[in-house]
Image (cartoon, rainbow, N blue to C red):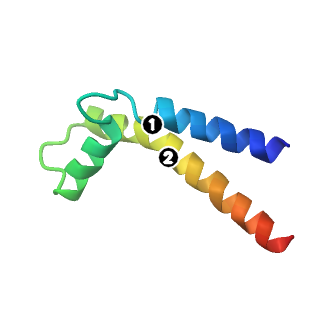
Amino acid sequence: MKGNNNLVMALLATLTLGLAPFFPEPHFFGKVRWVLGGANGMQPMDWFDLFMHGAPWVWLAYELVKLIVQKARA
């Protein structure tokens, strides 16, 4: 049950902090697009912002991989 709780919490964090602000586009996607475009003009605050909005996505990916590995071993 604890594993599912972690997955639900990671999903909730991703849907809130990971996508906030929602309009005009999620912050995370704008920052990733900026980095993929060369990160020209990114200030330390922009990198911190990318980390803060990206952390829930990393957590969600970790929980999903952990769940897949557990299912494969069972």
Q: Is residue 3 above or below residue 71?
A: above
Q: Find residue 62 and report its image quarter.
A: bottom right
- Is residue 35 or residue 41 the one in the foreground? 35
Q: Residue 74's x, y, as percent?
A: 87, 70
Res. 38 mark: none
Q: Is residue 33 left or right of residue 55?
A: left
Category of crowding for the residue at label 1, using alpha-carbon neighbours closer than 10 angstroms: few (below 14), some (14–19), many (at least 20): many
Q: Name the residue under label 2.
A: 57
Q: In this view, does 43 lie to the left or right of 62?
A: left
Q: In this view, does 57 lie above or below 25?
A: below
Q: Residue 18's x, y, as percent?
A: 45, 36
Q: Is residue 6 left or right of residue 39?
A: right
Q: Name the residue under label 1.
A: 18
- Residue at position x 12%, y 43% from top? 41
Q: In which quarter of the image is the N terminus?
A: top right
Q: Find residue 12 and report its image quarter.
A: top right
Q: Are marks 2 and 1 in contact (CB under 8 Å)?
A: yes
